Amino acid sequence: MSSPAPALQGQVLAGHNRISTQALTSLAKAAAAEALGVPAQDVRADWSDDDGLLALSLVAPINIPPLKAVVADAARIASFGGSIWDRTVAAKARILATVTALSGARLSRVDIRISGVRISEGGRVK
């Protein structure tokens, strides 16, 4: 019995690879959940074609500090990474980079709609 020839790094082999829509969706939900500090099951992800590239649309809540804590100490906003707007803009870039790096898929954009908030005593999501 012979063993297959070892593949050399960078060698292109015949065939194709496909990543299912379900796998891409799970990846996008996990990346968004990490970036927004919410559970992945709270994130909705939809894909569309954008001139041959993938456009990702996300709907998710976002973590915020308790409002009483913000009134008492406005610096609590900074401990969460800034305003909801600033955090959402930063999350878009992180999600795009994560999904692209892990899947190899070419995304044209990531659109995020914040659907609500989750009150959290913690701070910034790493």
Image (cartoon, rainbow, N blue to C red):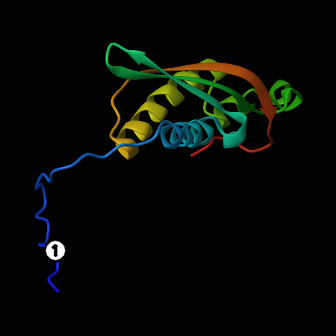
| Disc 1 secondary structure class | loop
Residue plotted at (30% across, 46% down): 17
Q: Is residue 4 above or below residue 120?
A: below
Residue furthest to the top: 51
Q: Quadrant of residue 123?
A: top right
Residue density around tag 1, few if under 14, some if 14–19, many if 20 or more, within 10 Å: few
Residue plotted at (35% across, 43% down): 18
The three-letter code of the residue at mark 1 reads Pro
Residue plotted at (49% across, 36% down): 21
Residue furthest to the right: 68
Q: Is residue 42 above or below residue 107?
A: below
Residue 26 x, y percent position in the rendering: 56, 42
Q: Quadrant of residue 84?
A: top right
Q: Is residue 59 above or below residue 42?
A: above
Residue 50 x, y percent position in the rendering: 38, 14
Q: Is residue 40 rendered to the left or right of residue 90?
A: right
Residue 63 x, y percent position in the rendering: 73, 34
Q: Is residue 105 rendered to the left or right of residue 115?
A: left
Residue corresponding to mark 1 = 4
In front: 6, or 68?
A: 6
Q: The N terminus appears in which quarter of the rendering?
A: bottom left
Residue 90 x, y percent position in the rendering: 50, 27
